[in-house]
Protein backbone atom coordinates (compact mmCIF):
# COMPACT_ATOMS: atom_id res chain seq x y z
CA UNK A 1 0.00 0.00 0.00
CA UNK A 2 1.35 3.44 -0.94
CA UNK A 3 1.30 6.28 1.61
CA UNK A 4 -2.02 8.13 1.89
CA UNK A 5 -2.37 11.62 0.39
CA UNK A 6 -0.47 13.97 2.75
CA UNK A 7 -2.28 15.97 5.41
CA UNK A 8 -3.44 19.42 4.31
CA UNK A 9 -3.68 18.44 0.63
CA UNK A 10 -6.74 19.48 -1.35
CA UNK A 11 -9.45 17.26 -2.77
CA UNK A 12 -11.49 18.84 -5.57
CA UNK A 13 -15.17 17.91 -5.64
CA UNK A 14 -17.26 18.48 -8.76
CA UNK A 15 -20.78 19.35 -7.64
CA UNK A 16 -21.83 21.39 -4.64
CA UNK A 17 -24.91 19.63 -3.27
CA UNK A 18 -25.46 17.72 -0.05
CA UNK A 19 -23.32 14.79 -1.15
CA UNK A 20 -20.39 17.14 -1.72
CA UNK A 21 -21.09 18.78 1.62
CA UNK A 22 -20.93 15.47 3.50
CA UNK A 23 -17.81 14.45 1.55
CA UNK A 24 -16.17 17.76 2.52
CA UNK A 25 -16.94 17.14 6.20
CA UNK A 26 -15.49 13.61 6.02
CA UNK A 27 -12.40 14.90 4.21
CA UNK A 28 -11.86 17.54 6.92
CA UNK A 29 -11.95 14.80 9.58
CA UNK A 30 -9.09 13.06 7.75
CA UNK A 31 -7.06 16.26 7.60
CA UNK A 32 -7.81 17.34 4.02
CA UNK A 33 -9.06 20.56 2.49
CA UNK A 34 -11.79 20.46 -0.13
CA UNK A 35 -12.40 22.75 -3.10
CA UNK A 36 -15.89 22.68 -4.61
CA UNK A 37 -16.64 23.32 -8.30
CA UNK A 38 -20.28 24.27 -8.72
CA UNK A 39 -21.92 26.76 -11.09
CA UNK A 40 -25.11 27.16 -9.04
CA UNK A 41 -25.91 27.32 -5.34
CA UNK A 42 -23.47 25.21 -3.30
CA UNK A 43 -24.47 23.92 0.15
CA UNK A 44 -21.17 22.02 0.01
CA UNK A 45 -19.18 25.26 -0.12
CA UNK A 46 -20.21 26.07 3.47
CA UNK A 47 -18.13 23.10 4.61
CA UNK A 48 -15.21 23.51 2.17
CA UNK A 49 -12.00 25.58 2.06
CA UNK A 50 -12.68 26.97 -1.42
CA UNK A 51 -15.40 27.24 -4.05
CA UNK A 52 -15.09 27.92 -7.75
CA UNK A 53 -18.45 29.17 -8.95
CA UNK A 54 -18.22 28.82 -12.73
CA UNK A 55 -19.95 26.89 -15.51
CA UNK A 56 -18.50 23.65 -16.91
CA UNK A 57 -17.94 25.54 -20.18
CA UNK A 58 -15.42 27.90 -18.51
CA UNK A 59 -12.16 26.19 -19.48
CA UNK A 60 -9.93 28.70 -17.68
CA UNK A 61 -11.85 28.17 -14.43
CA UNK A 62 -11.59 24.39 -14.87
CA UNK A 63 -7.83 24.62 -15.47
CA UNK A 64 -7.29 26.82 -12.40
CA UNK A 65 -9.46 24.50 -10.28
CA UNK A 66 -7.53 21.39 -11.39
CA UNK A 67 -4.20 23.12 -10.69
CA UNK A 68 -5.37 23.97 -7.15
CA UNK A 69 -6.33 20.34 -6.35
CA UNK A 70 -4.17 17.32 -5.56
CA UNK A 71 -6.88 14.96 -6.73
CA UNK A 72 -10.43 15.34 -7.98
CA UNK A 73 -13.64 13.42 -7.29
CA UNK A 74 -17.32 14.17 -7.94
CA UNK A 75 -20.75 13.94 -6.39
CA UNK A 76 -22.82 13.74 -9.58
CA UNK A 77 -22.44 12.06 -12.95
CA UNK A 78 -23.38 14.58 -15.59
CA UNK A 79 -20.01 16.22 -16.11
CA UNK A 80 -19.43 17.14 -19.78
CA UNK A 81 -16.68 15.20 -21.58
CA UNK A 82 -14.84 18.39 -22.64
CA UNK A 83 -14.63 19.46 -18.98
CA UNK A 84 -13.27 16.04 -18.04
CA UNK A 85 -10.56 16.34 -20.71
CA UNK A 86 -9.29 19.48 -19.00
CA UNK A 87 -9.76 18.32 -15.41
CA UNK A 88 -8.13 14.94 -15.70
CA UNK A 89 -5.16 16.17 -17.79
CA UNK A 90 -2.71 16.59 -14.89
CA UNK A 91 -4.72 15.88 -11.74
CA UNK A 92 -5.86 12.35 -10.85
CA UNK A 93 -9.63 11.76 -11.07
CA UNK A 94 -11.26 9.11 -8.85
CA UNK A 95 -13.39 7.22 -9.81
CA UNK A 96 -11.92 7.42 -13.30
CA UNK A 97 -13.51 8.50 -16.58
CA UNK A 98 -14.52 5.03 -17.68
CA UNK A 99 -16.78 4.51 -14.66
CA UNK A 100 -18.25 7.96 -15.15
CA UNK A 101 -18.85 7.57 -18.86
CA UNK A 102 -20.46 4.14 -18.49
CA UNK A 103 -22.91 5.40 -15.88
CA UNK A 104 -23.70 8.65 -17.74
CA UNK A 105 -25.62 6.77 -20.43
CA UNK A 106 -28.25 4.18 -19.59
CA UNK A 107 -27.60 2.26 -22.82
CA UNK A 108 -23.84 1.99 -22.21
CA UNK A 109 -24.50 1.13 -18.57
CA UNK A 110 -26.97 -1.67 -19.34
CA UNK A 111 -24.70 -3.07 -22.06
CA UNK A 112 -21.74 -3.06 -19.65
CA UNK A 113 -23.80 -4.91 -17.03
CA UNK A 114 -25.12 -7.57 -19.41
CA UNK A 115 -21.61 -8.06 -20.87
CA UNK A 116 -20.53 -8.88 -17.31
CA UNK A 117 -23.20 -11.58 -17.24
CA UNK A 118 -25.43 -9.68 -14.81
CA UNK A 119 -29.21 -9.55 -15.23
CA UNK A 120 -30.95 -6.31 -16.18
CA UNK A 121 -34.46 -5.54 -17.39
CA UNK A 122 -34.75 -6.29 -21.12
CA UNK A 123 -33.81 -3.08 -22.94
CA UNK A 124 -33.52 -1.55 -26.40
CA UNK A 125 -32.39 1.86 -27.69
CA UNK A 126 -34.88 4.32 -29.18
CA UNK A 127 -33.53 7.18 -31.26
CA UNK A 128 -36.82 8.04 -32.95
CA UNK A 129 -40.40 6.90 -33.44
CA UNK A 130 -39.35 4.37 -36.09
CA UNK A 131 -37.52 2.36 -33.39
CA UNK A 132 -40.53 2.06 -31.08
CA UNK A 133 -42.15 -1.11 -32.39
CA UNK A 134 -38.88 -3.08 -32.54
CA UNK A 135 -37.92 -1.90 -29.04
CA UNK A 136 -41.26 -2.93 -27.55
CA UNK A 137 -40.90 -6.32 -29.24
CA UNK A 138 -37.74 -6.76 -27.09
CA UNK A 139 -39.10 -5.35 -23.84
CA UNK A 140 -42.78 -6.32 -24.02
CA UNK A 141 -45.32 -4.14 -22.21
CA UNK A 142 -45.67 -2.69 -19.68
CA UNK A 143 -42.39 -0.88 -20.29
CA UNK A 144 -40.66 2.31 -19.21
CA UNK A 145 -39.05 4.81 -21.53
CA UNK A 146 -36.05 6.56 -19.99
CA UNK A 147 -33.81 9.24 -21.46
CA UNK A 148 -30.33 7.81 -21.94
CA UNK A 149 -28.71 10.74 -20.15
CA UNK A 150 -29.45 13.31 -17.45
CA UNK A 151 -32.21 11.39 -15.63
CA UNK A 152 -32.46 11.43 -11.85
CA UNK A 153 -35.12 10.95 -9.17
CA UNK A 154 -37.51 9.46 -11.75
CA UNK A 155 -37.16 12.48 -14.08
CA UNK A 156 -36.87 11.79 -17.81
CA UNK A 157 -39.09 8.70 -17.59
CA UNK A 158 -42.46 7.76 -19.09
CA UNK A 159 -44.46 4.58 -18.58
CA UNK A 160 -46.00 2.55 -21.39
CA UNK A 161 -48.86 0.36 -20.22
CA UNK A 162 -49.69 -0.91 -23.71
CA UNK A 163 -48.26 -0.31 -27.22
CA UNK A 164 -51.01 2.31 -27.78
CA UNK A 165 -49.31 4.59 -25.19
CA UNK A 166 -45.90 4.36 -26.80
CA UNK A 167 -46.01 7.43 -29.03
CA UNK A 168 -47.31 9.67 -26.24
CA UNK A 169 -44.57 8.41 -23.91
CA UNK A 170 -41.92 9.15 -26.54
CA UNK A 171 -43.36 12.64 -27.08
CA UNK A 172 -42.99 13.23 -23.32
CA UNK A 173 -39.23 12.81 -23.67
CA UNK A 174 -39.11 15.57 -26.31
CA UNK A 175 -36.81 13.86 -28.77
CA UNK A 176 -34.04 12.96 -26.30
CA UNK A 177 -32.26 9.66 -27.14
CA UNK A 178 -33.90 7.04 -24.95
CA UNK A 179 -34.06 3.41 -24.04
CA UNK A 180 -37.10 1.25 -23.46
CA UNK A 181 -36.93 -1.07 -20.47
CA UNK A 182 -39.24 -3.95 -19.71
CA UNK A 183 -41.17 -3.42 -16.48
CA UNK A 184 -39.73 -5.59 -13.72
CA UNK A 185 -42.28 -6.85 -11.22
CA UNK A 186 -40.05 -6.76 -8.19
CA UNK A 187 -40.84 -7.64 -4.60
CA UNK A 188 -38.36 -5.14 -3.13
CA UNK A 189 -35.85 -2.52 -4.16
CA UNK A 190 -32.45 -2.72 -2.49
CA UNK A 191 -29.06 -1.14 -2.94
CA UNK A 192 -25.53 -2.06 -2.09
CA UNK A 193 -22.97 0.60 -1.33
CA UNK A 194 -19.46 -0.74 -1.78
CA UNK A 195 -15.97 0.67 -2.00
CA UNK A 196 -12.73 -0.27 -3.73
CA UNK A 197 -9.43 1.17 -2.58
CA UNK A 198 -6.48 2.27 -4.69
CA UNK A 199 -4.83 -1.05 -3.78
CA UNK A 200 -7.80 -3.07 -5.11
CA UNK A 201 -9.25 -4.01 -1.72
CA UNK A 202 -13.06 -4.12 -1.59
CA UNK A 203 -15.47 -3.51 1.31
CA UNK A 204 -19.25 -3.58 1.03
CA UNK A 205 -21.99 -2.42 3.37
CA UNK A 206 -25.06 -4.50 4.13
CA UNK A 207 -27.77 -4.07 1.45
CA UNK A 208 -30.40 -1.46 2.37
CA UNK A 209 -34.09 -1.73 1.44
CA UNK A 210 -35.35 1.34 -0.38
CA UNK A 211 -38.79 2.81 -0.57
CA UNK A 212 -39.54 5.53 -3.15
CA UNK A 213 -42.36 8.06 -3.23
CA UNK A 214 -43.05 10.00 -6.44
CA UNK A 215 -39.82 8.65 -7.92
CA UNK A 216 -37.73 10.04 -5.03
CA UNK A 217 -36.07 7.92 -2.35
CA UNK A 218 -38.13 8.26 0.84
CA UNK A 219 -36.56 5.71 3.21
CA UNK A 220 -33.77 3.17 3.44
CA UNK A 221 -34.01 0.41 6.04
CA UNK A 222 -31.23 -1.85 7.29
CA UNK A 223 -31.28 -4.72 7.62
CA UNK A 224 -33.26 -5.35 4.42
CA UNK A 225 -35.71 -8.19 4.91
CA UNK A 226 -33.92 -10.67 2.67
CA UNK A 227 -32.59 -14.19 3.05
CA UNK A 228 -28.83 -14.37 3.65
CA UNK A 229 -28.11 -15.83 0.21
CA UNK A 230 -29.75 -12.87 -1.56
CA UNK A 231 -27.71 -10.43 0.54
CA UNK A 232 -24.57 -12.30 -0.41
CA UNK A 233 -25.55 -12.27 -4.10
CA UNK A 234 -26.11 -8.51 -3.94
CA UNK A 235 -22.67 -7.92 -2.43
CA UNK A 236 -21.01 -10.23 -4.96
CA UNK A 237 -22.67 -8.31 -7.82
CA UNK A 238 -21.33 -5.02 -6.47
CA UNK A 239 -17.83 -6.47 -6.02
CA UNK A 240 -17.92 -7.82 -9.55
CA UNK A 241 -18.75 -4.38 -10.96
CA UNK A 242 -16.06 -2.66 -8.88
CA UNK A 243 -13.40 -5.06 -10.06
CA UNK A 244 -14.49 -4.99 -13.72
CA UNK A 245 -14.20 -1.20 -13.68
CA UNK A 246 -10.84 -1.23 -11.83
CA UNK A 247 -12.72 1.26 -9.70
CA UNK A 248 -11.53 3.58 -6.92
CA UNK A 249 -14.08 5.02 -4.49
CA UNK A 250 -17.66 4.35 -3.42
CA UNK A 251 -20.15 2.86 -5.87
CA UNK A 252 -23.92 2.55 -5.39
CA UNK A 253 -25.70 -0.38 -7.06
CA UNK A 254 -29.52 -0.34 -7.18
CA UNK A 255 -31.14 -3.75 -7.53
CA UNK A 256 -34.61 -5.19 -7.93
CA UNK A 257 -35.39 -8.33 -5.93
CA UNK A 258 -37.50 -10.78 -7.93
CA UNK A 259 -38.51 -14.41 -7.39
CA UNK A 260 -36.00 -15.34 -10.11
CA UNK A 261 -33.09 -13.48 -8.50
CA UNK A 262 -31.54 -10.01 -8.49
CA UNK A 263 -31.81 -7.60 -11.40
CA UNK A 264 -29.48 -4.61 -11.60
CA UNK A 265 -31.38 -1.35 -12.17
CA UNK A 266 -28.53 1.14 -12.24
CA UNK A 267 -25.13 2.02 -10.86
CA UNK A 268 -24.01 5.35 -9.43
CA UNK A 269 -20.25 6.03 -9.39
CA UNK A 270 -20.43 8.10 -6.20
CA UNK A 271 -21.74 8.24 -2.68
CA UNK A 272 -25.47 7.55 -2.73
CA UNK A 273 -28.56 8.69 -0.87
CA UNK A 274 -29.36 5.08 0.00
CA UNK A 275 -26.02 4.88 1.85
CA UNK A 276 -26.73 7.69 4.31
CA UNK A 277 -27.74 5.15 6.96
CA UNK A 278 -24.04 4.23 7.30
CA UNK A 279 -23.53 7.50 9.20
CA UNK A 280 -25.41 5.97 12.14
CA UNK A 281 -24.88 2.27 11.45
CA UNK A 282 -21.15 1.89 10.83
CA UNK A 283 -17.85 2.99 12.36
CA UNK A 284 -16.74 4.29 8.95
CA UNK A 285 -19.59 5.80 6.93
CA UNK A 286 -19.80 5.96 3.12
CA UNK A 287 -18.40 9.50 2.99
CA UNK A 288 -15.29 8.71 5.01
CA UNK A 289 -14.97 5.44 3.10
CA UNK A 290 -14.96 7.32 -0.22
CA UNK A 291 -12.33 9.76 1.02
CA UNK A 292 -10.25 6.86 2.39
CA UNK A 293 -10.51 5.00 -0.93
CA UNK A 294 -9.46 7.90 -3.15
CA UNK A 295 -6.66 9.16 -0.88
CA UNK A 296 -5.11 5.74 -0.30
CA UNK A 297 -6.07 5.06 3.33
CA UNK A 298 -7.03 1.50 4.36
CA UNK A 299 -10.79 0.98 3.92
CA UNK A 300 -13.16 0.55 6.85
CA UNK A 301 -14.51 -3.00 6.93
CA UNK A 302 -18.16 -2.01 6.29
CA UNK A 303 -19.56 -3.92 9.26
CA UNK A 304 -22.79 -2.65 10.79
CA UNK A 305 -23.30 -2.12 14.54
CA UNK A 306 -26.93 -0.88 14.48
CA UNK A 307 -30.23 -1.30 12.68
CA UNK A 308 -31.14 2.00 11.06
CA UNK A 309 -34.09 3.67 9.35
CA UNK A 310 -32.98 6.56 7.13
CA UNK A 311 -35.74 9.02 6.22
CA UNK A 312 -35.23 11.80 3.71
CA UNK A 313 -36.67 15.19 4.63
CA UNK A 314 -38.17 16.38 1.35
CA UNK A 315 -39.57 19.89 0.88
CA UNK A 316 -41.51 21.09 3.91
CA UNK A 317 -40.74 17.85 5.79
CA UNK A 318 -37.71 19.76 7.06
CA UNK A 319 -40.11 21.59 9.39
CA UNK A 320 -40.37 18.36 11.41
CA UNK A 321 -36.62 18.33 12.17
CA UNK A 322 -36.98 19.77 15.72
CA UNK A 323 -39.56 17.08 16.58
CA UNK A 324 -37.18 14.39 15.28
CA UNK A 325 -34.36 15.93 17.29
CA UNK A 326 -36.41 15.34 20.43
CA UNK A 327 -36.68 11.60 19.65
CA UNK A 328 -33.99 9.42 21.28
CA UNK A 329 -31.57 7.65 18.95
CA UNK A 330 -32.17 10.03 16.05
CA UNK A 331 -29.37 11.67 14.10
CA UNK A 332 -30.25 14.81 12.14
CA UNK A 333 -28.51 15.95 8.94
CA UNK A 334 -29.63 19.24 7.39
CA UNK A 335 -28.14 20.49 4.15
CA UNK A 336 -28.22 24.25 4.75
CA UNK A 337 -30.58 24.90 1.82
CA UNK A 338 -32.49 28.09 2.51
CA UNK A 339 -34.98 27.71 -0.34
CA UNK A 340 -37.54 24.99 0.52
CA UNK A 341 -39.06 23.60 -2.69
CA UNK A 342 -41.43 20.70 -3.32
CA UNK A 343 -39.47 17.51 -4.08
CA UNK A 344 -36.16 19.06 -2.96
CA UNK A 345 -33.98 17.01 -0.61
CA UNK A 346 -33.51 19.31 2.41
CA UNK A 347 -32.00 16.87 4.92
CA UNK A 348 -32.36 13.38 6.32
CA UNK A 349 -32.59 11.63 9.63
CA UNK A 350 -31.05 8.35 10.73
CA UNK A 351 -33.11 6.60 13.36
CA UNK A 352 -31.33 3.84 15.26
CA UNK A 353 -33.93 1.11 15.61
CA UNK A 354 -31.87 -1.42 17.55
CA UNK A 355 -28.52 -3.17 17.83
CA UNK A 356 -27.40 -5.09 14.76
P1 LIG B 1 -34.30 4.89 -12.01
O1 LIG B 1 -34.22 6.35 -12.33
O2 LIG B 1 -33.87 4.02 -13.14
O3 LIG B 1 -33.60 4.55 -10.72
O4 LIG B 1 -35.85 4.59 -11.72
C1 LIG B 1 -36.55 5.19 -10.65
C2 LIG B 1 -37.53 4.19 -10.06
O5 LIG B 1 -38.48 3.76 -11.05
C3 LIG B 1 -36.89 2.89 -9.57
O6 LIG B 1 -36.38 3.04 -8.27
C4 LIG B 1 -38.07 1.92 -9.63
O7 LIG B 1 -38.95 2.12 -8.53
C5 LIG B 1 -38.79 2.37 -10.89
N1 LIG B 1 -38.28 1.62 -12.04
C6 LIG B 1 -37.26 2.00 -12.83
N2 LIG B 1 -37.03 1.08 -13.80
C7 LIG B 1 -37.93 0.11 -13.65
C8 LIG B 1 -38.22 -1.12 -14.33
N3 LIG B 1 -37.52 -1.50 -15.43
N4 LIG B 1 -39.21 -1.88 -13.86
C9 LIG B 1 -39.94 -1.52 -12.78
N5 LIG B 1 -39.74 -0.37 -12.09
C10 LIG B 1 -38.74 0.45 -12.51
Image (cartoon, rainbow, N blue to C red):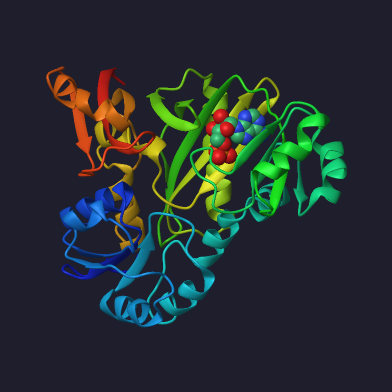
Q: Residue at x 28, y 56 (%)?
A: 41
Total count of labels: 0
Q: Find residue 4 and report its horizontal and vertical position in percent.
A: 27, 66
Q: Quadrant of ligand 1?
A: top right
Q: Position of residue 118 (x, y in %)?
A: 68, 42
346 lies above or below 307:
below
Horizontal relation, residue 8 to residue 185: left or right: left
Foreground of the two, 158 or 289? 158
Q: Quadrant of residue 28?
A: bottom left
Place of residue 5 in the rendered image (x, y in percent of width and height, measured from the top left): 26, 68
Q: Is residue 233 visible?
A: no
Q: Residue at x 51, y 29 (%)?
A: 190
In this rendered view, identify the residue nearer to me: 338 or 121: 338
Quadrant where the N terminus sits is bottom left
x, y (%) of residue 195? 42, 49
For the residue pair 69 and 192, the one nearer the viewer reads as: 69
Residue 146 horizontal side relative to residue 211, left or right: right
Residue found 41% across the figure and 69% down from its top: 93
Q: Quadrant of the C terminus?
A: top left
**Could you tell me if residue 355 is visible in this image?**
yes
9 is higher (above) or lower (below) than 279: below
The correct choice, above or below, for 220 with respect to 205 in the image is above
Left or right relative to 40: residue 82: right
Amino acid sequence: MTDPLPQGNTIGILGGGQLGRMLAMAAARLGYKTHIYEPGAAPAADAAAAWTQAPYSDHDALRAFAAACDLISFEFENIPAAALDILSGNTPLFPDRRALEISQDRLTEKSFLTDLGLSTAPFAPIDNAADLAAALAVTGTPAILKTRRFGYDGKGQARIASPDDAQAALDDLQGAPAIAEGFVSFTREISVIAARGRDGSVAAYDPGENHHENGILATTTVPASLPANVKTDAILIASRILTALDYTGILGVELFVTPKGLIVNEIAPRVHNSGHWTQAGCAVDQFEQHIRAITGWPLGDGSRHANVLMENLIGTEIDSAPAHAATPGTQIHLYGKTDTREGRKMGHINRITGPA
